[in-house]
Amino acid sequence: MTRSQTRPAAMPPTSTSPSPGDLVALSARCSTKRDLRLIHGALLRRRHLLPTADAVAALAKLLRFAAVSPAGDLRQAAVILSTHLPFITSASTHPAFFYNTLMRGLAASSSPADAIGLFAAMRRAGAAPDAFTFTFVLKSCSRCPSGRRLPSDLHAQAIRHGCLGELAAHTHVHNALLHAYACRAAVDDACRVFEEIPARDVISFSGLLTAHLKANDLDAARLVFDKMPHRDVVSWTAMISAYAKACRPQEALALFDAMPMQPDEVTMVSIVSACTTLGDLATGERVRRHIDSLGFGWMMSLRNALMDMYAKCGSLPEARALFDGMTVRSLASWNTLISAYASHGDLDNTIAVFYQMLAEGNTVKPDGVTFLAVLMAYAYNGCVEEGRAMFNAMQQGGYGKVELTVEHYGCVVDMLGRAGKLEEAYQMIEQMPIPSNAVIWGALLGACRTHGDIDMAERAVQELRNLKPEEGGYYILLSDMYTSAGRIAEATEIRRAMNERGVQKTTGRSTAFLPQL
C-alpha cells in the first residue's frame, strides 16, 4: 500500500505534514474523524506560523466540522475550543461564534444539558452572547425540561443583551424561548412570548400549540391549531395524537379525515391507537388498508399498533397473523401478543409465545411487561403454583435482571387472593421490599369480599385508610360485608363515620394489572 493510500482525503499526498498555507484549505476540506485529529495536530504545531486571520479561520472551519457535521466528534470539538480559547479570545473579533458553534452541536446531541453548561462557562469567561447563542441554549433548554426556572433566567439575560426585538434574528430567539416555555407546559409565559413576536411564523404557532398540548388543554390547542396560517404534517399529527392519547378517538379520526396532505408513520400510529380506543374493528380495517396503500405496512411500529388493535377488538387470529408475518420482531411485538393472549385468559398461547421468545432470545429479552402479562395469565387461570414458581425465579434472577415493581407483586397478590390464600397474600404485601399502594391493598380487599374474610378485610381497610383517606369505596365494601354477615351495628357505624368525615363514595374494586402497551 502506498503512502498516499493511507492518508486522509484532506491531506496532500505529496507531503508528510501540511505547510502553514495549506491549513486553512485543509480545515475546510476535513471530512472524517481521522482528518480532524491530523489537521488539528498540525494546527497545534504550526498555528504560530499563520497570519492571525488565517489561524482564526482554520480553527473556525475545523470546529464547525467537529461540532456540527454528522461525521464530526463533539469531544474533539470541545478539545479544540478549550485548547485554543485564549488565542480565540484575544485574536477573534467575535469569540461568541466559537461558543455558538459548539453549543449548536451539543444542543442537537444526546447530551443537550452540556450546551447549557457551556453557556454558563461562556458567561463566566466574560464572553458576550448574541442572538444565536440564546437560540442554541434555549433549544437545549427545550430538550432538558427539568430546570423549570431556566427559561425565565435565559429570558431575562436575552433582554439584557438586546436579543429580543424587531430584528429577523430575534424571531429565532423568540421562537426558541417560546418552545422552552412550551416544553414545561408554562402556558402563560408561552402566550406572552407569542404575543411579543413581531413576525410570527409556523414555528411560533407550533410552539404555542405545544404549550397547550403539554398542559393537556386540548380545546385551547385546537383553537390555536385552527388559527395556524400554515399547518404541516407535524402540527396535524400533534393534534391527532393528542386526541388519541386523551381517549377522544372520534375527534382524532375526524381530524385525520380532514388532513389535506399525506400522513406519516407517526400519524398512522396515532390513528390506529384511536381505533383501538374506539373498539371499532371496521374502521381499523379501513385504516389498515390505507396504511398498505401508503406503503407503510412493513413498518414495525405500525404492525405492533395493528396487533394491539386486533387483540383489543377481540380478533386474536388477525393479531397472530401479523406477528407471524414479521421477519424481525421488537420487544414491543412480543409483549403485545403475549399480553393479548393473557388479557383473554388464553394461558396455553401466552406460555407458548413466552417460551418461543426465550428460545429466540439472542436479540430480544423479556422485560417487566412480559412477566407481568404471564403472571396475569396464571392468575386468571388459577395456576397458583406455576405463578408462584415464576415469581420466585424472577426474584432469584433465573430470567436475568428483571426489576420487580409493585405491579408484579400486585399481580401475585391478586393470584393468591383469587385462590383464597389471603394470609399468604397479606404476608407478601407486608414483606415487599418496595412501598405498597392502594391498588395492591384494594386487590386484597376484593379477594376478602369474594371469600368472606372480614378479619383480613379490616386489616386491608386500615391500610387503605392510611393511603387514601378521602376515598369511600373501600369503607362501603367492608360495610356490605358486615351487613352480609349480620353485623348491622358495625355496618351502620362505618356509614356514619364516612358521613362525618365527608368521605367520597367511590367504588372499591380489585384492579387488573395488565400493562397498557
Image (tube, rainbow, N blue to C red):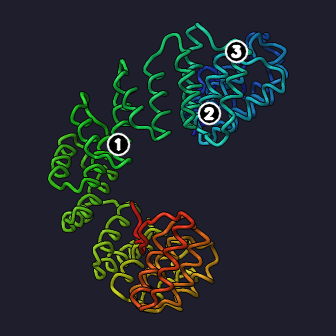
Instruction: Look at discs 2 and 1 and give the one toward the viewer.
Output: 1
Mark 2 or 1 closer to N-term? 2
Of residue 426 and residue 70, the one placed in the foreground of this image is: 426
* Residue 246 location (% of width, % of height): 38, 47
| Vertical order, 392 against 476 (above or below) | below
Mark 2 or 3 closer to N-term? 3
* Residue 392 location (% of width, % of height): 53, 86
| Vertical order, 111 against 161 (above or below) | below
| Vertical order, 268 against 24 (above or below) | below
Name the residue: 54% across, 14% down.
197
- The residue type indicated by label 2 comes to Ser
- Please tell me whether mark 3 sits on a helix, a strand or a loop: helix
* Residue 48 location (% of width, % of height): 84, 17
Name the residue: 70% across, 15% down.
57
- The residue type indicated by label 3 comes to Ala
* Residue 168 location (% of width, % of height): 55, 9
Judging by the rendered image, the residue that carries numbered circle 2 is 140
Mark 3 or 1 closer to N-term? 3
Q: CA distance from mark 2 to mark 3?
A: 27 Å
Judging by the rendered image, the residue that carries numbered circle 3 is 57
Q: CA distance from mark 2 to mark 1?
A: 28 Å
Judging by the rendered image, the residue that carries numbered circle 1 is 243
